[in-house]
């Protein structure tokens, strides 16, 4: 069983452990903003997500398994209150991929967005080469809507194309 918990400083050690166990895999998709590695960076990361939740702009959750390990991170960000949509993202700890963790995180985040935030639409913007995340989106019930050219900023190079997937309430 996977439960999502709003990120808090009590999760710092669990989150750091998951990032360190996964940084080689995560770094191909995410920059350091989503994978903080020092104690100071983790504290700032948690502060940012906590203040975002308080302001209603972005929400971060740690995914905890039955062994009380952090096995991933999920987020709702870029919340547009007027048009009632937001972006959904996640990462999964190395060694936990291929087990349905990302799909479950996605489903729980969508439920939070639709039930608690009262959003109508959730968008998942996924790099064209990230086939595994595209499969997760589809397993969670998202529909691929199209190709977004140069949608994602390059980590160390040019911007990258992405597919837009959506979940509708």
Image (cartoon, helix red, strand yellow):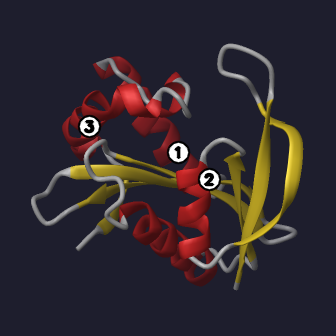
Question: Based on the displayed image, in which of its 4 quarters is residue 63 positioned?
Answer: bottom left
Query: Residue sitting at 27 percent across and 28 percent down?
Result: 20
Cβ atoms at labels 2 and 1 below 8 Å apart: yes
| Crowd class of label 2 (few under 14; some 14 to 19; many from 20; radius 10 Å) | few
On residue 51, the disc is 1
Residue occupying image coordinates x 55% and y 75%? 140
159, above or below 148, in the image: above
* Image disc number at residue 55: 2
What's the distance in space between the residues labelled 2 and 1, CA to CA? 6 Å
Nearer the observer, disc 2 or disc 3?
3
Label 3 residue SS: helix
Quarter in which the N terminus is drawn: bottom left
Mark 2 or mark 3: whose residue is earlier in sequence = 3
Instruction: Give x and y (percent) for residue 68.
Output: 13, 57
Q: Is residue 78 in view from this perspective?
A: yes
Residue 70 at x, y percent in the picture = 25, 50
Identify the disc placed on residue 164: none
């Amino acid at each position: 069983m996977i439960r999502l918990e709003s990120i808090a400083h009590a999760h710092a050690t669990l989150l750091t452990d998951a990032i360190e166990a996964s940084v080689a895999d995560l770094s191909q998709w995410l920059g350091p903003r989503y994978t903080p590695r020092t104690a100071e960076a983790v504290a700032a990361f948690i502060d940012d997500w906590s203040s975002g939740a308080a302001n209603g702009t972005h929400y971060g959750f740690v995914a905890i398994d039955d062994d009380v390990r952090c096995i991933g991170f999920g987020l709702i960000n870029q919340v547009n209150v007027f048009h009632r949509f937001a972006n959904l993202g996640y990462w999964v700890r190395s060694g936990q991929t291929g087990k349905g963790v990302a799909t479950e995180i996605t489903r729980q985040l969508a439920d939070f967005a639709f039930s608690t935030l009262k959003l109508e639409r959730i968008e998942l913007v996924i790099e064209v080469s990230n086939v595994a995340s595209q499969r997760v989106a589809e397993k969670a019930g998202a529909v691929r809507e199209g190709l977004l050219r140069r949608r994602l900023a390059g980590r160390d190079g040019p911007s990258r194309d992405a597919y837009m997937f959506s979940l509708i309430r």
